[in-house]
Amino acid sequence: MISRKNKTLAVNPKARLLAGAATQSILAIPAVISLGVSLAQPASAQSAAVQNHSTTVNLSTYGNGGQVSINTGTSITPGFGDAIIGNAGAAWALSNAGAVNAANGSGIMLDAAGSVANQSTGTIIAGNYGVRVENGAGSVANAGLISAGYDGVSLNRGGEVGNAMGGTISGGHIGVYTGNGAGDVANAGVITARTGDAVSLYNGGNFSNAASGQVTGGYSGVYAGGNGSSISNAGALSGTEFGVYLAGAGHITNTGSIGGGIDGVIDVAQNGVVENSGVINGGKIGLRIANNGQVMNSGTITGGTTGVKLGNGGELTNRRAG
Protein backbone atom coordinates (compact mmCIF):
# COMPACT_ATOMS: atom_id res chain seq x y z
CA MET A 1 0.00 0.00 0.00
CA ILE A 2 1.22 3.43 -0.86
CA SER A 3 0.57 6.00 1.83
CA ARG A 4 0.95 9.72 1.84
CA LYS A 5 1.61 12.10 4.70
CA ASN A 6 -1.02 14.79 5.24
CA LYS A 7 0.21 18.36 5.30
CA THR A 8 -1.22 20.61 8.00
CA LEU A 9 -1.16 23.83 6.01
CA ALA A 10 -3.90 24.89 3.64
CA VAL A 11 -3.41 26.67 0.40
CA ASN A 12 -4.53 27.28 -3.16
CA PRO A 13 -3.36 29.08 -6.30
CA LYS A 14 -4.79 29.76 -9.71
CA ALA A 15 -2.58 30.65 -12.59
CA ARG A 16 -4.45 32.23 -15.46
CA LEU A 17 -1.71 33.01 -17.96
CA LEU A 18 -2.86 35.48 -20.55
CA ALA A 19 -0.70 35.59 -23.64
CA GLY A 20 -0.29 39.04 -25.12
CA ALA A 21 -2.18 40.79 -22.34
CA ALA A 22 -1.69 44.54 -22.25
CA THR A 23 0.13 46.00 -19.26
CA GLN A 24 -2.37 46.73 -16.53
CA SER A 25 -2.22 47.73 -12.90
CA ILE A 26 -1.23 45.07 -10.45
CA LEU A 27 -4.55 45.47 -8.68
CA ALA A 28 -6.48 44.90 -11.88
CA ILE A 29 -4.49 41.74 -12.65
CA PRO A 30 -3.34 40.41 -9.28
CA ALA A 31 -0.40 38.36 -10.47
CA VAL A 32 -1.26 37.12 -13.87
CA ILE A 33 1.58 36.66 -16.31
CA SER A 34 2.03 35.36 -19.80
CA LEU A 35 4.00 32.17 -20.18
CA GLY A 36 7.31 32.99 -21.76
CA VAL A 37 6.82 36.75 -21.25
CA SER A 38 8.49 38.73 -18.46
CA LEU A 39 6.28 40.77 -16.20
CA ALA A 40 6.05 44.42 -17.09
CA GLN A 41 7.89 46.72 -14.73
CA PRO A 42 5.44 48.59 -12.50
CA ALA A 43 4.98 52.24 -13.44
CA SER A 44 2.14 53.72 -11.44
CA ALA A 45 2.01 56.97 -9.54
CA GLN A 46 -0.38 55.25 -7.15
CA SER A 47 2.19 52.63 -6.13
CA ALA A 48 4.20 53.29 -2.96
CA ALA A 49 7.88 52.43 -3.28
CA VAL A 50 9.66 50.57 -0.48
CA GLN A 51 13.20 51.74 0.27
CA ASN A 52 16.16 49.68 1.52
CA HIS A 53 15.51 48.02 4.87
CA SER A 54 17.57 45.91 7.25
CA THR A 55 14.52 45.16 9.40
CA THR A 56 11.05 43.74 8.72
CA VAL A 57 8.85 45.89 6.49
CA ASN A 58 5.25 46.15 7.70
CA LEU A 59 3.10 47.16 4.73
CA SER A 60 0.63 48.93 7.04
CA THR A 61 3.18 51.75 6.98
CA TYR A 62 2.00 52.40 3.42
CA GLY A 63 -1.72 52.46 4.19
CA ASN A 64 -4.48 49.92 4.43
CA GLY A 65 -3.93 47.91 1.29
CA GLY A 66 -3.11 48.85 -2.28
CA GLN A 67 -0.10 48.77 -4.57
CA VAL A 68 3.42 48.64 -3.21
CA SER A 69 6.59 48.19 -5.26
CA ILE A 70 10.18 47.22 -4.58
CA ASN A 71 12.28 48.64 -7.38
CA THR A 72 15.44 47.31 -8.99
CA GLY A 73 18.42 47.89 -6.71
CA THR A 74 16.33 47.93 -3.52
CA SER A 75 17.13 45.35 -0.85
CA ILE A 76 14.98 44.13 2.07
CA THR A 77 17.26 42.05 4.29
CA PRO A 78 16.27 41.74 7.96
CA GLY A 79 18.70 40.09 10.32
CA PHE A 80 15.87 38.08 11.89
CA GLY A 81 12.22 37.35 11.10
CA ASP A 82 10.14 37.88 7.99
CA ALA A 83 11.22 40.37 5.36
CA ILE A 84 7.76 41.76 4.47
CA ILE A 85 4.43 41.36 6.26
CA GLY A 86 0.97 42.51 5.24
CA ASN A 87 -1.62 43.10 7.94
CA ALA A 88 -4.93 41.25 8.10
CA GLY A 89 -7.93 42.99 6.62
CA ALA A 90 -5.92 44.71 3.88
CA ALA A 91 -5.47 43.42 0.34
CA TRP A 92 -1.99 44.17 -0.95
CA ALA A 93 -0.63 44.10 -4.49
CA LEU A 94 3.12 43.84 -4.17
CA SER A 95 5.54 44.02 -7.09
CA ASN A 96 9.17 43.09 -6.55
CA ALA A 97 12.02 43.89 -8.92
CA GLY A 98 14.64 44.02 -6.17
CA ALA A 99 16.02 41.62 -3.56
CA VAL A 100 14.00 40.22 -0.66
CA ASN A 101 16.05 38.05 1.70
CA ALA A 102 14.97 36.51 5.00
CA ALA A 103 17.45 33.87 6.10
CA ASN A 104 15.64 33.30 9.42
CA GLY A 105 12.03 33.85 8.35
CA SER A 106 9.73 34.13 5.36
CA GLY A 107 10.17 36.43 2.40
CA ILE A 108 6.63 37.80 2.00
CA MET A 109 3.77 37.01 4.41
CA LEU A 110 0.32 38.39 3.59
CA ASP A 111 -2.36 37.85 6.22
CA ALA A 112 -5.24 38.63 3.87
CA ALA A 113 -6.07 38.34 0.18
CA GLY A 114 -3.39 39.78 -2.03
CA SER A 115 -0.98 39.34 -4.88
CA VAL A 116 2.74 39.20 -5.47
CA ALA A 117 4.36 39.83 -8.84
CA ASN A 118 8.05 38.93 -8.84
CA GLN A 119 9.72 40.55 -11.84
CA SER A 120 12.50 39.01 -13.93
CA THR A 121 15.06 40.98 -11.84
CA GLY A 122 13.35 40.09 -8.58
CA THR A 123 14.66 37.59 -6.03
CA ILE A 124 12.83 36.28 -2.98
CA ILE A 125 15.02 34.03 -0.85
CA ALA A 126 13.91 32.80 2.58
CA GLY A 127 14.62 30.21 5.23
CA ASN A 128 10.92 29.41 5.73
CA TYR A 129 8.34 30.38 3.08
CA GLY A 130 9.19 32.35 0.00
CA VAL A 131 5.67 33.77 -0.43
CA ARG A 132 2.74 32.88 1.81
CA VAL A 133 -0.83 34.22 1.66
CA GLU A 134 -2.88 33.07 4.62
CA ASN A 135 -6.46 34.28 5.12
CA GLY A 136 -7.65 35.21 1.67
CA ALA A 137 -7.26 34.31 -1.97
CA GLY A 138 -3.71 34.78 -3.20
CA SER A 139 -2.08 35.28 -6.56
CA VAL A 140 1.59 34.88 -7.36
CA ALA A 141 3.23 35.60 -10.69
CA ASN A 142 6.92 34.87 -11.01
CA ALA A 143 9.43 35.68 -13.71
CA GLY A 144 12.44 35.81 -11.38
CA LEU A 145 13.61 33.62 -8.49
CA ILE A 146 11.65 32.42 -5.46
CA SER A 147 13.61 30.03 -3.27
CA ALA A 148 12.76 28.88 0.26
CA GLY A 149 13.81 26.38 2.88
CA TYR A 150 10.23 25.15 3.33
CA ASP A 151 7.66 26.01 0.63
CA GLY A 152 8.48 28.29 -2.26
CA VAL A 153 4.87 29.50 -2.64
CA SER A 154 2.09 28.67 -0.17
CA LEU A 155 -1.45 30.01 -0.67
CA ASN A 156 -3.73 29.00 2.17
CA ARG A 157 -7.11 30.13 0.85
CA GLY A 158 -6.93 29.54 -2.85
CA GLY A 159 -5.71 31.61 -5.73
CA GLU A 160 -3.37 31.26 -8.68
CA VAL A 161 0.29 30.78 -9.45
CA GLY A 162 2.00 31.43 -12.75
CA ASN A 163 5.68 30.77 -13.35
CA ALA A 164 6.96 32.26 -16.60
CA MET A 165 9.76 31.04 -18.83
CA GLY A 166 12.96 32.03 -17.08
CA GLY A 167 11.27 31.94 -13.68
CA THR A 168 12.27 29.53 -10.90
CA ILE A 169 10.29 28.49 -7.82
CA SER A 170 11.97 26.07 -5.42
CA GLY A 171 11.27 24.78 -1.94
CA GLY A 172 13.08 22.55 0.49
CA HIS A 173 9.76 20.85 1.16
CA ILE A 174 7.28 21.83 -1.57
CA GLY A 175 7.68 24.13 -4.54
CA VAL A 176 4.08 25.35 -4.93
CA TYR A 177 1.43 24.30 -2.40
CA THR A 178 -2.34 24.76 -2.68
CA GLY A 179 -4.51 23.68 0.23
CA ASN A 180 -8.12 24.32 1.23
CA GLY A 181 -9.46 25.27 -2.15
CA ALA A 182 -8.96 24.40 -5.78
CA GLY A 183 -5.63 25.62 -7.08
CA ASP A 184 -4.58 26.54 -10.58
CA VAL A 185 -0.89 26.47 -11.42
CA ALA A 186 0.66 27.16 -14.82
CA ASN A 187 4.36 26.72 -15.47
CA ALA A 188 6.71 27.54 -18.32
CA GLY A 189 9.83 27.80 -16.17
CA VAL A 190 11.32 25.64 -13.41
CA ILE A 191 9.57 24.36 -10.27
CA THR A 192 11.45 22.08 -7.86
CA ALA A 193 11.12 20.56 -4.40
CA ARG A 194 13.85 18.82 -2.48
CA THR A 195 11.81 16.39 -0.32
CA GLY A 196 8.11 16.78 -1.20
CA ASP A 197 5.94 17.59 -4.19
CA ALA A 198 7.13 20.13 -6.71
CA VAL A 199 3.46 21.13 -7.15
CA SER A 200 0.86 20.10 -4.58
CA LEU A 201 -2.77 20.71 -5.55
CA TYR A 202 -3.73 19.49 -2.11
CA ASN A 203 -7.47 19.89 -2.53
CA GLY A 204 -7.44 19.48 -6.29
CA GLY A 205 -7.35 21.91 -9.17
CA ASN A 206 -5.53 22.38 -12.45
CA PHE A 207 -1.91 22.24 -13.50
CA SER A 208 -0.43 22.97 -16.89
CA ASN A 209 3.20 22.60 -17.88
CA ALA A 210 4.33 24.19 -21.14
CA ALA A 211 6.92 22.64 -23.45
CA SER A 212 9.59 24.79 -21.79
CA GLY A 213 8.48 23.78 -18.29
CA GLN A 214 10.61 21.63 -16.00
CA VAL A 215 9.06 20.20 -12.83
CA THR A 216 11.06 18.03 -10.43
CA GLY A 217 9.90 16.82 -7.01
CA GLY A 218 11.54 14.96 -4.14
CA TYR A 219 8.35 12.91 -3.73
CA SER A 220 6.16 13.61 -6.75
CA GLY A 221 6.31 16.05 -9.60
CA VAL A 222 2.62 16.90 -9.22
CA TYR A 223 0.24 15.72 -6.51
CA ALA A 224 -3.50 16.32 -6.94
CA GLY A 225 -6.10 15.57 -4.29
CA GLY A 226 -9.86 15.87 -4.66
CA ASN A 227 -11.95 14.90 -7.65
CA GLY A 228 -11.97 16.68 -10.96
CA SER A 229 -8.30 17.69 -11.10
CA SER A 230 -6.74 18.27 -14.51
CA ILE A 231 -3.05 17.81 -15.30
CA SER A 232 -1.72 18.85 -18.69
CA ASN A 233 1.96 18.31 -19.46
CA ALA A 234 3.90 19.23 -22.57
CA GLY A 235 7.26 19.62 -20.84
CA ALA A 236 9.40 17.53 -18.48
CA LEU A 237 7.78 16.37 -15.23
CA SER A 238 9.35 13.96 -12.74
CA GLY A 239 9.48 12.89 -9.10
CA THR A 240 11.84 10.76 -7.05
CA GLU A 241 8.93 8.41 -6.33
CA PHE A 242 6.05 9.46 -8.62
CA GLY A 243 5.79 11.68 -11.64
CA VAL A 244 2.09 12.43 -11.14
CA TYR A 245 0.12 11.25 -8.11
CA LEU A 246 -3.68 11.47 -8.39
CA ALA A 247 -5.48 11.00 -5.07
CA GLY A 248 -8.90 11.76 -6.59
CA ALA A 249 -10.61 11.10 -9.88
CA GLY A 250 -8.77 13.28 -12.34
CA HIS A 251 -7.64 13.68 -15.92
CA ILE A 252 -4.08 13.66 -17.24
CA THR A 253 -3.09 14.73 -20.73
CA ASN A 254 0.56 14.14 -21.56
CA THR A 255 2.37 15.15 -24.72
CA GLY A 256 5.71 15.60 -22.96
CA SER A 257 7.61 13.33 -20.59
CA ILE A 258 6.59 12.05 -17.14
CA GLY A 259 8.89 9.96 -14.99
CA GLY A 260 8.92 8.51 -11.48
CA GLY A 261 11.32 6.34 -9.50
CA ILE A 262 8.44 4.03 -8.52
CA ASP A 263 5.54 4.88 -10.85
CA GLY A 264 5.47 7.37 -13.68
CA VAL A 265 1.78 8.00 -13.00
CA ILE A 266 -0.26 6.61 -10.11
CA ASP A 267 -4.01 7.09 -9.65
CA VAL A 268 -5.31 5.69 -6.37
CA ALA A 269 -8.90 6.87 -6.86
CA GLN A 270 -11.54 5.58 -9.26
CA ASN A 271 -12.61 6.78 -12.71
CA GLY A 272 -9.34 8.45 -13.61
CA VAL A 273 -8.49 9.19 -17.23
CA VAL A 274 -5.03 9.32 -18.82
CA GLU A 275 -4.42 10.40 -22.40
CA ASN A 276 -0.81 9.92 -23.47
CA SER A 277 0.89 10.76 -26.72
CA GLY A 278 4.24 11.46 -25.08
CA VAL A 279 6.47 9.35 -22.83
CA ILE A 280 5.61 7.94 -19.39
CA ASN A 281 8.22 5.92 -17.53
CA GLY A 282 8.37 4.41 -14.05
CA GLY A 283 11.14 2.61 -12.20
CA LYS A 284 8.65 -0.17 -11.41
CA ILE A 285 5.37 0.63 -13.16
CA GLY A 286 4.89 3.09 -15.95
CA LEU A 287 1.23 3.85 -15.25
CA ARG A 288 -0.86 2.46 -12.40
CA ILE A 289 -4.55 3.35 -12.46
CA ALA A 290 -7.30 2.33 -10.03
CA ASN A 291 -10.73 0.83 -10.64
CA ASN A 292 -12.71 1.93 -13.68
CA GLY A 293 -9.82 3.97 -15.02
CA GLN A 294 -9.29 4.69 -18.70
CA VAL A 295 -5.98 4.87 -20.53
CA MET A 296 -5.73 6.08 -24.12
CA ASN A 297 -2.20 5.73 -25.39
CA SER A 298 -0.62 6.70 -28.67
CA GLY A 299 2.80 7.34 -27.14
CA THR A 300 5.18 5.28 -25.02
CA ILE A 301 4.57 3.86 -21.54
CA THR A 302 7.32 1.80 -19.94
CA GLY A 303 8.18 0.45 -16.50
CA GLY A 304 10.89 -1.62 -14.86
CA THR A 305 8.45 -4.48 -14.33
CA THR A 306 5.10 -3.38 -15.80
CA GLY A 307 4.10 -0.84 -18.38
CA VAL A 308 0.43 -0.33 -17.48
CA LYS A 309 -1.38 -1.79 -14.47
CA LEU A 310 -5.17 -1.46 -14.55
CA GLY A 311 -7.60 -1.79 -11.65
CA ASN A 312 -10.90 -3.64 -11.86
CA GLY A 313 -13.01 -2.38 -14.73
CA GLY A 314 -10.06 -0.51 -16.22
CA GLU A 315 -9.72 0.00 -19.95
CA LEU A 316 -6.62 0.47 -22.12
CA THR A 317 -6.82 1.72 -25.68
CA ASN A 318 -3.45 1.44 -27.38
CA ARG A 319 -3.49 3.26 -30.67
CA ARG A 320 -1.23 2.45 -33.59
CA ALA A 321 1.48 4.95 -32.67
CA GLY A 322 1.68 3.63 -29.11
Image: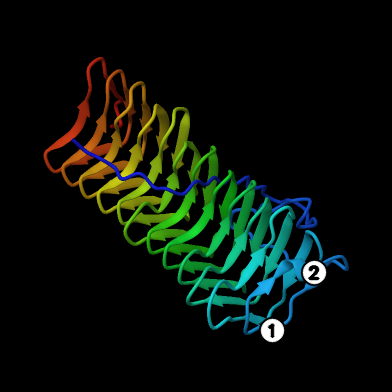
Q: Quadrant of the N terminus?
A: top left
Residue 70: x %, y % from top left:
71, 73
Residue 19, label in figure: none
Residue 41 visible at all: no
Residue 90: x %, y % from top left:
74, 55
Kindly give the residue lying farthest to the left in the view shown: 305
> Which amino acid type is shown beneath numbered disc 2?
Tyr
Q: Which residue is mark 2?
A: 62
- Which of the two labelled residues, at mark 2 and mark 1, occupies the earlier sequence position? 1
Residue displayed at 58% across by 43% down: 158
Disc 1 is placed on an element classified as loop
From the viewer's perspective, tell me whether residue 276 is left or right of residue 102: left
Q: Which residue is mark 1?
A: 52
Of badges 2 and 1, nearer the viewer stands 2
Residue displayed at 51% across by 73% down: 125
Snapshot quadrant of residue 12: top right
> Which amino acid type is shown beneath numbered disc 1?
Asn
Q: Are marks 2 and 1 in contact (CB under 8 Å)?
A: no
